[in-house]
Amino acid sequence: MWDYTDKVKDHFLNPRNVGEIENPSCWGEVGSLACGDALKLTLKLDEKEKIVDAKFLTFGCASAIASSSALTEIIKGMTLSEADKVTNQDIAKYLGELPEQKMHCSVMGREALEAAIRNFRTGSTEPVALKGRVVCTCFGVTEEEVERVIRENTLTEVEQVTNYCKAGGGCGSCRGEIQRIIDRIQGVAAAGDATPQRPKRLTVMQKIKMIEETIDREIRPSLVKDGGDLELIDVDGNRVIVGTRGTCASCPASPITMKELVEAKLREFVDENLVVEEEKI
Amino acid sequence: MKRVYLDNNATTRVADEVFEEMGPWFTEEYGNPSSMHTYGDRAGKAVRKARERVAALLNCSPEEILITSCGTESDNTAIRGTLESYPTKRHIITTRVEHPAVRVTCRHFKSHHGYALTELPVDGKGRISLSELEDNLRDDTALVSIMHANNETGVVFPLERIAEIVKSRGCILHCDAVQTAGKLPLDMRRVPVDLLSISGHKLHAPKGVGALFVRHGTKLSPFMLGGHQEGGKRAGTENVPYIVGLGKACELALKHLDDENTRVRALRDKLQAGLVARCRDPYLNGDTMDRLPNTLNISFEFVEGEAILLLMDAVGIAASSGSACTSGSLEPSHVLRAMGIPFTRAHGSIRYSLSRYTTEEEIDYVIEKMPPIIERLRSMSPFGRSAGQ
């Protein structure tokens, strides 16, 4: 039924540090009623910026309440600089684990902590720092926040990003953009560790083989996920002719996929002079 | 610990009488109804008797009853079978508050097969507009699929009036009556609906069996192929024990129909009055006039549904919520959203659904336990103090 660890259940049924500190040293507030969860964190610091008390008020599901409770337990006794290093993963680990679709609860805890620290350092009372461009307008999630959850939690799929920060969970119109952010971050990361050096000059057979491998490894998985597919039909010099299959064949966004996904990947992994053309049936 | 089950719109307890009657059909009378021997003959007769009992609940002839594996299969059979029978008609009408079995299937025909789809909106109380239905009927409307009562709010649509309007234009009408069978009278001789779905486990039969009423003469392409069973409309060896169970459950449902509308209704009304009086800021969701006698949907603002359910579960009370957090999605219930209920109220909605087994003592227990649960969560909520001011 409820996919929660005993620790989550305990922190939900017996939450620690519920309430609001009077005259707090600093506070942070994130979320809203409309979003389905919200957290107000108040902190009391001593003269050495050590957190001597932390209290929370949370509107949300069981894991939101448990994450808030865990957060206050984790940061009590830390200095503000130590607390600044706490991640959503620390909160999730403290609770044993959280179901993936509830990871955004741990992210909310980290965001509230950040807001409180910012409040102390700059006096800002902005509930959420809307730094950068908003990617998901339904839940007001910025590009920076999306990038951060992808990096900190090594996310590879749009659905995971939605589970971690809600982006993409409303109307869904930003899901393509989230995918591109994932591709950018994980693509760069992968290239960073182990991209084989491209040989200077390829034989025709080598080129075809590399194109096929790149399609299999880098392109096909994301098309198949949406019910589509791609077939290599011919390679003529630097012209790569492909045919779209499945849902891709009727997809109005197919020309964009060709340029932004297929051509970009083939240029990245095979040869920067390649031009992809779609065979029309 | 005391346990109170108020989630009967999700599923019901199998009636003892039903369970008992099913038993021998597993262990002694296990024949295949198609077989040419006494085993087969007895199984065949049992299925026939069960079909008669289902027909009696709907006041139709047994030949008009198609047995399926569940309500979802009944809905799929009705929608797919009708659309395939009228390939030149390319328009479907349904509502925004249908069960996913209907909603997703209709949307599938829009997105994958290019059908035009009209989803009728509902007002703040969850009611559709009959004139809007009338205005949207077209010459190429293949199917109108409208539920009888909503599973989340219990709001009942005026099936008779809907049937009159749809049939006056000669269109096929399917009705998902999964939530009403056994709770409200269903008379197929009086209401000219063409197809009507019911589900066993919503009326004290086990999960895994359902039925579809198919009016004589209604064109319906079979969905399951590969056998002569169910008059060629649904291939597959009959699930004899479950069909026997469904028959018995329908017989009991007919007998308890009065009880549902008197005793169960009174208990639901008592629960509603008790919670409204004792909990701060309750909001009743949906029309309270035309409503299933067993269903109550209340929102508690400033608290979240999953948290309420878990605290209820901790004191042994089972119910359900339209909160996003109970569904795995981030958007709260599509039904409450279609009604224009603000997110803030949809997140804290709780559905209580009673049955013939619900007792007054249980209702008193729930009325006693709910207010402290709501207060406890509100005291934890940053918005809690806005409540009641």
Image: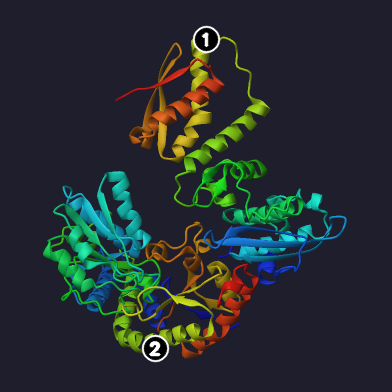
Q: Is residue B29 above or below residue B262?
A: above
Which residue lies most toward the right here?
A48
Residue B336 visible in the shown view: yes
Q: Chain of mark 1?
A: A
- Amino acid residing under circle 2: Ala
Q: Is residue A232 above or below residue B83?
A: above
The answer as to whether the residues below labels 2 and 1 share one chain is: no
**Position in image of residue B177 (x %, y %):** 29, 70
Q: Nearer the viewer, residue A215 or B307?
A: B307
Residue, disc 2 = B266
Q: Which quarter of the picture shows residue B306?
A: bottom right
Which residue lies most toward the front here?
A123
What label does residue A203 carry, if any?
A: 1
Few, some or many C-alpha atoms within 10 Å of disc 2 (few <14, some 14-19, many ≥20)?
some
Q: CA distance from mark 2 to mark 1?
A: 83 Å
Residue at image location 54% in from the left, 80% down from the top? B280
The C terminus of chain A - image quarter:
top left
Task: Give the side of residue B50 with respect to residue B364, left or right.
Answer: left
**Position in image of residue B41 (x %, y %):** 25, 70
